[in-house]
Image (tube, rainbow, N blue to C red):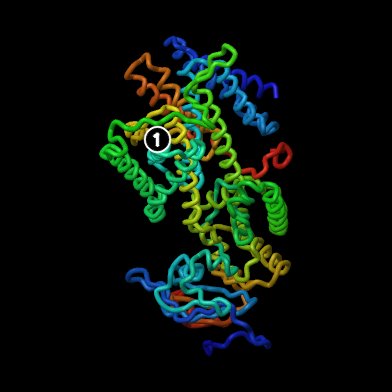
Amino acid sequence: MSAVSTMSKASPQKQILLAEKLTMRFGGVTALDSLDLHVNEGEVLGLLGPNGSGKTTFFNVITGLYRASAGKVAFRGEDLTDATAQQVYLNAITRTFQRSRLSLPLTVFDNIAIGDNRRLNTGLIFNLFQREKFRKEYEVLVEQVRQLLLTFNPKLADKIFEPVASLPMIDRRRIEICRALISQPDLLLLDEPSAGMTHDETAEVMDDILQVRSKIKPFTIILIEHEMGLIQRMTERCIVLNYGKKIAEGTYDEIVNNREVQVAYLGQE
Amino acid sequence: MKLLISTFVACLVYSILLLGSENQLEVGALVVLAFVVSLVGKKMGLMEKLAVAVREHPQFPAYASVFGVLVIMLFFHNSHFALLMLATVLIYSIVCLGLNIQFGYVGIVNFAGAAFFGIGSYTAAILATHTAVPHLLVLFIAAGISALIGSILIYPVLRTRGHYAALVTIAFGILFRNFLEVNDTLGGPQGLKIPPFTIFGWNLSEGLDIGGFEISFYIPYLLIALFLLIASFRITRNLERSWIGLSMDMVRTDEIAASTFGVNIAHWKVVAFTLGNFIAGMAGALYGMMTAYVAPNNFTFADSLILVSIVILGGIGNPWGIIPAAAIVVILPEKLQFIQEYRFLLYAIVVILILLFRPDGLLPRRIREYFPSNKVGGQR
């Protein structure tokens, strides 16, 4: 869509997500200001910008938690602008949250299992009266969750039936990511996975995600992140927001040398 | 196993003594005894040992409780008052199982429990007096009507959250009672008489005389109550240990995360609310037929509070907690007649003490195990 140089790859790339003139206003504040943005199939896109620049708002609009004030969102050509959170999820888009949103009293298994809601049979008769059939579905899912946890951290797989409240921050973040991955999404939205973790822990979790990605399928990722090392290592293309507007787009090297980005982050000298 | 059986026998003997005692000192001594035993038990870690034992024999509590009720029933086969209390405990437990689905799983506190109970009773009164519908069917029609009237509340309950949803139910409870008091067709403040329960021409309220044994007419009602309690208990249990229970827990703990993963919040709230009111209405119909009389005064806000306090006292979300909690709440005020007007004060103190020392209720809800057994996850 835009004339900004896309990637230097040879093959023409298919767009998986397209936002046109996307605007989100809260009272007098314009969190997203006619944002034009596209995401290519299979890429890792970095979304950067100072605090309050509209990154998380963008995720919330995409996932149906907020309804856009104006503009359009399309996923694989399908209009998702007014879709509810459930409809977005059914289109195989999942996300993590910046601040952990796990249900602490529930077990690791419970928290991850709900991520597979799309494929669970929640019929009344099935759940209440056909216990043997239910047991089969249950056992298949336990095995899937265990396998996923094993790729992330073998020790975590032993704690599958323990309440999340008893686990440290890094494990909770892993569980949040597993919850987003268990249904094998096409698009994964990661909202600042490094928040509240050390540098090494973040690196570990990111490697796990890439490992799962190479195992299941090359799903697309949009990554909100402040940690530049992570952006450099993970992303193929970056978009920088400021005051809800796109101010730069390109590879990591291109955006760090962009004058406008430097001003946005460091201020006028 | 030894521990389980001895605990069971102790509980059984205690229940019989409490139900049978008419002496004021005896009741007082029994209440004190319960406190001392629970304190000593806590010091000795008895609860933990019991929990381990139950884990090894997960089926034991269910069979033991049913057996216990039957033994008590036979013991008091001709004592109306004891049987009435026992049946009331069972019926209150059924209602609270319904409220537990609403409160414990999706997190809607229903302060109109007594109103839905009352809808069941009134429906039974009208159907049994004016129509020839078989009385067993009346139970289910009454339950259905209770759920149907509950659906009036669904829209405001879905639009509000937490305390505000609770306020909506409080308003409905008060509205319901005032409606009954001014409505002459429904008997006004005097209420209605309900004809006795009849199954296949057999009038349950006539009592029986088998082989010289005089059997109280409460026994058939007790058996029906026991049967309905087992059925609702099983449904609640399966509900909790399924994807439905999981979805409902997600709705209660984090609506935003739940909807991001495709959980339909409104759907599960409607299911839980309707199912809970259905169960409450069913219990109400049975209670009405047993006591043969309904009046608006039985369904006040205070009665709704009692139902909610049973759920909290037992341990929110744990169906096993409800039965002992219902026993305490129903039996204690009745048995403490000797201190006259002060009995409600004492009863309130007991509730406060329990919540002070066991804030999660008598039997706090445990972590969900979809298929509990002594092997899977039992090494902990």
Query: Residue B69: in sight, yes or no?
Result: yes
Identified at 54% across, 77% down, the residue is A78
Q: Position of residue B222 (x, y in %)?
A: 52, 26
Q: Nearer the viewer, residue B11 or A101?
A: B11
Q: Please identify the quarter of the rendering in which residue B145 is found.
A: top left
B149 vs B347: above or below: below
Q: Please identify the quarter of the rendering in which residue A66 is found.
A: bottom left
Q: Please identify the quarter of the rendering in which residue A222 is found.
A: bottom right
B252 vs A228: above or below: above
Q: Looking at the rendering, in which quadrant would you find the N terminus of chain B?
A: top right
Q: Position of residue A255 (x, y in %)?
A: 54, 80
B41 vs B213: above or below: below
Give the residue type that dot 1 points to.
Answer: Thr
Judge from the rendering whether residue B129 lies leftward or rightward of residue A229; answer left or right.
left
Identified at 34% across, 36% down, the residue is B301
Q: Extreme bottom residue here?
A: A3
Classed neighbour count for the residue bearing mark 1: other residues with Cα under 10 Å, few (<14), some (14–19), many (≥20):
some
A212 vs B295: above or below: below
Q: Nearer the viewer, residue B256 or B185?
A: B185
Judge from the rendering whether residue A24 lies leftward or rightward of residue A185; answer left or right.
left
Mark 1 chain? B
Q: Nearer the viewer, residue A168 or B309?
A: B309
For label 1, the residue is B129
Identified at 57% across, 68% down, the residue is A189
Q: Position of residue A127 (x, y in %)?
A: 62, 49
Judge from the rendering whether residue A40 lies leftward or rightward of residue A137; answer left or right.
left
Q: Looking at the rendering, in which quadrant would you find the C terminus of chain B?
A: top right
Q: Position of residue A111 (x, y in %)?
A: 59, 53
For mark 1, give the secondary structure.
helix
Judge from the rendering whether residue B168 lies leftward or rightward of residue B216; answer left or right.
left
